[in-house]
Image (cartoon, rainbow, N blue to C red):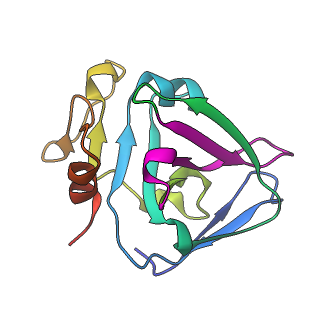
Amino acid sequence: MADELHGGCQCGAVRYVARPSVRFRTYACHCTDCQSQTGSAFALHQWVLAGDLETTGECIEGKRALADGSTLSIFGCPACLSRIYSVRSSRNQIKTLRLGTLDDSASFMPDIHIWTRSKQPWIQIPGGTKSMEKQTDSVEEWVRLMVVK
């Protein structure tokens, strides 16, 4: 993985660079929310610390309530509506980057698959790849799982 991650929206109005000071694992989320938001079978994500992501261009913000009582804010391009990243109010020091927006997304494969109990039946998770039927409820456990040591 490169030291810096570069990407942006489809039309180029929003660009970003992530300079990760902490390395997090890449994960595929198969929850029905991600399926609805992406119009696909899963979403490919990676966390970055909030201070490590720099964007240029104006982003719009959409919000929705989550089952745990927190709020999810989704940031994207106002022109082409590409979703760039999201932030949960319960862990606002972390931004969840949508890896499909990277300039070189082909080099990222999921280290972990979550919410596999709702994955599409035709998705085959490679042998030896960590998978979880849902995600952990504990923020601390989730962070331990995501941090690359």
Percent coordinates x, y for residue 46 in the rendering: 43, 56
Furthest toward the front, the residue is 69
Furthest toward the right, the residue is 79
Q: Is residue 36 left or right of residue 25?
A: right
Percent coordinates x, y for residue 48 in the rendering: 46, 64
Q: In this view, does 89 lie above or below 122?
A: below
Q: Image quadrant for the N terminus?
A: bottom left
> What residue is at 48 percent from the left and 57 percent from the top?
106
Q: Is residue 93 left or right of residue 84?
A: left
- In this rendering, the count of numbered labels is 0
- Give the camera-side residue of 36 and 125: 36
Q: In this view, does 115 lie above or below 13?
A: above
Percent coordinates x, y for residue 24 in the rendering: 34, 64
> What residue is at 21 percent from the left and 41 percent from the top?
126
Using the rendered image of the protein, determine whether residue 23 is visible from the camera's viewpoint: yes
Furthest toward the left, the residue is 128
Q: Image quadrant for the C terminus?
A: bottom left
Range drawn in magenta: 70-93
Q: In this view, does 102 lie above or below 131?
A: below
Q: Is residue 83 magenta?
A: yes
> What residue is at 20 percent from the left and 50 percent from the top?
141
Percent coordinates x, y for residue 138 in the rendering: 24, 43
- Give the camera-side residue of 129 and 149: 149
Using the rendered image of the protein, determine whether residue 39 is visible from the camera's viewpoint: no
- Give the camera-side residue of 25 and 91: 91
Corner quadrant of residue 61 = top right
> What residue is at 35 percent from the left and 48 percent from the top?
27
Q: In this view, does 148 lie to the left or right of 23?
A: left
Q: In this view, does 46 lie to the left or right of 139?
A: right
Q: Does the magenta stretch include residue 147?
A: no
